[in-house]
Amino acid sequence: MAIEKNCTHIQFFRDAAPYIQAHKGKTFIIAISSRVIESSHFKQLINDIAILSTLGVKIVLVHGTRSQIDQQIQLQNIPSSMHKALRITTLEILDVSKNIVGRVRVNIENMLSYALNTPPIINSGLSIITGNFITAKPIGIHDGVDYQYTGQVRKIAKVQIEQQLDQHNIVLLSPLGLSPTGKAYNLHYEEVATKTANELSADKLIFILDTPDDLPRQLTLKEAKTHTKINPLIQRIDSALNSGVSRVHLIDAKNEGGILLELYTRDGSGTLISTEQYEEIKQASVSDIAGILELIRPLEEKGILIKRSREQLELEIDNFFVIKRDQKVIACAALYPIASSDVAELACLVVDDNYRGQQKGDVLLDFVENSVKQSAIKKLLVLTTQTTDWFQERGFIKGKVNDLPEAKKKLYNYQRNSQILLKSLEG
Ligand SMILES: CC(C)(COP(=O)(O)OP(=O)(O)OC[C@H]1O[C@@H](n2cnc3c(N)ncnc32)[C@H](O)[C@@H]1OP(=O)(O)O)[C@@H](O)C(=O)NCCC(=O)NCCS
């Protein structure tokens, strides 16, 4: 049992190692909703953020205060109104906001300082910095309605924030900003986070939310726009991804260790939104050779696939197709047209152990078949020792040596005694 547990830890560490390296020195903006701050998961989340910081990630933390302000307004019976889903901040509400921002900020500072100064992080020399990093301006009057002290971000003190991050400090930003004339304005934490991410050209913008975790793991920006649950954030996400932020993540605070799983495992735990596909299927290129070799070697050693040298693979790379997930090759297949025939041999179809049973094999087979649709190839041939049923279930029919094209007949290895399977691509 203990050995099994150790193996899981070791595997996690091995899987995480490339991500630890990749995220080191990168800038992540982490936006935490006001409801998450009130939840029982918040303390652990702060501890996990402290761990990220010790792993060399540059962190700007932005917190919300909406639900705390709502509660106080109700408690104190303060009149409050909205226009077009935006709160009108009166002077009275601004006072409440200032108090709440102060309280939440001190609370987070305390928790983070504690997390950074207790084992296992003690003495790391990291600290948390707050400051006047945001300049605000009023939203003004819209449709005749004066939003008073509801503001928007005018400027982010990029250089000053970057100086703090370079000194390994975590920068904490609140949804309150001052105008150059010293007036305070209530801001949306989502806007503060997004504008900061854009201004700093952050690598990631991460929203920690308390919404149910039933969104897909990966979405392109285009797909995200069709999800109603993402609707309230979509403008921010669009703005970030179009301003050079590489990826936006939505993480459910209820998932234990969700932020660590999302950032240090290939499959994550939240929803990753990017302009490009996280997983792609394509014709292979030279840069995929190492990944293909890593995938096929164990099967060659078991005798399931015929051994290919690196040199051979380099020569044949244009025949290969791959599925890549976050830059790693997780499936491959090769197609070799057979001279003087309308047949092409499909070989080396492999799906990484971790991704089997998810129709990746089907997707790859469809892709290969579509790639030859307009060509002279009318039949696919497979020679397999252990996967006959899988191919038969996908329309392949058993054949004999005599059914092979001449060029292939001569090369048929009777000792290996592979099953011959053929599939017509016509009709
Ligand atoms: C065969 C292979 C490519 C299928 O990939 P995959 O992405 O898991 O396939 P799919 O998700 O599309 O299909 C999974 C189904 O195939 C079945 N399957 C997997 N391997 C099989 C095999 N050798 N024989 C028969 N069925 C098989 C699974 O049990 C599953 O069936 P289910 O849906 O009824 O549970 C993958 O198992 C693999 O890489 N195998 C080792 C390499 C190999 O033998 N390649 C063929 C030589 S060219």
Image (cartoon, helix red, strand yellow):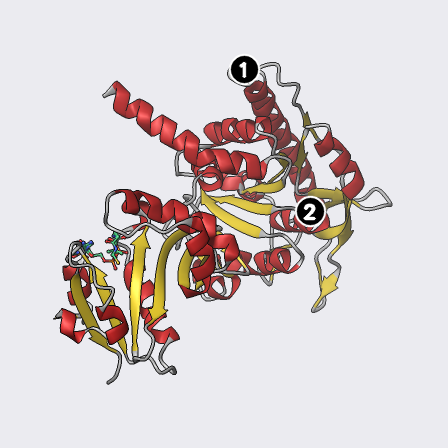
Left or right: where does residue 331 sit relative to residue 411?
right
Q: Residue 150 at what x, y percent from top left?
A: 70, 51
Q: Quadrant of the C terminus?
A: bottom left
Identify the residue at horizontal 63%, vertical 26% (top origin).
106
Q: Quadrant of residue 400?
A: bottom left
Residue furthest right as drawn: 181
Q: In this figure, which residue is indicated by the disc labeled 1?
A: 118
Q: Quadrant of the N terminus?
A: top left
Q: Residue 16 at what x, y percent from top left?
A: 46, 34
Q: State whether residue 301 is above or below residue 47.
A: below
Q: State whether residue 8 is above or below residue 146.
A: above
Task: Tell me if mark 1 has few (under 14), some (14-19) or many (20+) residues whose alpha carbon lies within 10 angstroms of its own.
Answer: few
Left or right: where does residue 254 sit relative to residue 197?
left
Identify the residue at horizontal 51%, vertical 56% (top origin).
286
User: Secondary structure under badge 2?
Assistant: helix
Q: Amino acid at mark 2?
A: Thr
Residue furthest bottom as drawn: 427
The numbered mark at residue 196 is: 2
Residue 49 in view in this figure: yes
Q: Nearer the viewer, residue 96 or 376?
A: 376
